[in-house]
Amino acid sequence: MIDTLPSPPTRPASAHKGTFGRVLIIGGSRGMSGAPSLSGLGALRGGAGLVYVAVPSEILPIVATIEPSYLTIPLATDEEHGSVSADGLTGLRKACVGQDAIALGPGLGTSRGATAIVTPLFAELPQPMVVDADALNVLAASRLGASKEARILKAAGPRILTPHPGEFARLLGCDIATVQNQRLKLAAEFAAAHGVIVLLKGHGTVITDGDRITIDATTRALTLDVDATAKKLLAQEGYDPQFGARPLKRAVQEHLLNPLSMKILEGDFKAGDKIKVTADGDELKFQRK
């Protein structure tokens, strides 16, 4: 159990805003000017040196007024829906050049224009990308009718998907209750299957790349390295570690992580606890050392 994260790098005294990276946030639509604005504020508070917020031109004055420290980029607007137009794709591709990270989706809407920009940008851009809100809904709609094993769009760079339970249910093609009953298992399986990082929001936010899982149960992280932590335990239970990584990970998720996450969320354990896991027949027992 790990409860520490790497410290942020030291900021040299000679540094300037260009030293700390450039972030582009793409989102917003009529009635949804707050979402990209708050995302811009979050990027600034997170330490980004230069933050750009690209929104439909109709709402740009509102977004620009909220915070003078980020820059704004106007996008071609679908006047009927007040959302981004497909004509904005060429300009967006140019705006993405030189950016260190992209956030796609807050307040974007799911209009035809939004779909026309989400799909290619998700697939083409080499930068790390946080995919949130309506960008997730667009991806979910593009998977309608596809098998559960079918990958979401293949991406040219790292992708971090940040769904709430409703958005994740749409991505999976199931109901919210199913998501909430199997948060760890489903998030880890989805991340591994699609080659993405999943941050599943909610009480006990789950963050996983399919191999490692972190549960943010309070305001601090509780982390398990799936392979390193559980291989020995599962071997004792009769699982063969040489059988293959993927079957092992599924076994870990089903037999270790789901019951442990419930113990954490119920308050039995806290960050920093060392936990002993033993098997009593088919039941796993968790004890604080």
Image (tube, grey):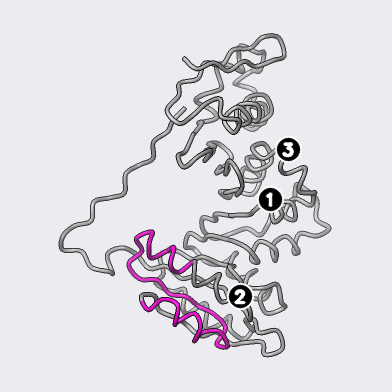
Q: Please name whichever residue, 107 or 92, is drawn nearer the observer in this view of the structure.
A: 107
Residue in the picture at 65% in, 13% down: 237
Disc 3 residue crowd, few under 14, some 14–19, many 20+, Cα 10 Å: few
How many neighbours does mark 1 have within 10 angstroms: few (below 14), some (14-19), or many (20 or more)? Answer: some
Kindly identify the residue that appears in the image at 75 percent across and 47 percent down: 149
The numbered disc on residue 181 is 3
What amino acid is found at the position of numbered circle 3 in the picture?
Answer: Asn
- Provide the secondary structure element on which disc 2 rests: loop
Q: Position of residue 108 (x, y in %)?
A: 62, 73
The image shows residue 253 at horizontal and vertical percentages of 65, 31
**Amino acid identity at mark 1:** Pro
The magenta-colored residue range is 39-68
Q: Which residue is mark 1?
A: 165
Q: At 51% across and 31% down in the image, what residue appears?
A: 224
Q: CA distance from mark 3 to mark 1?
A: 11 Å
The residue that mark 2 highlights is 32
Task: Tell me: 214 left or right of 188.
Answer: left
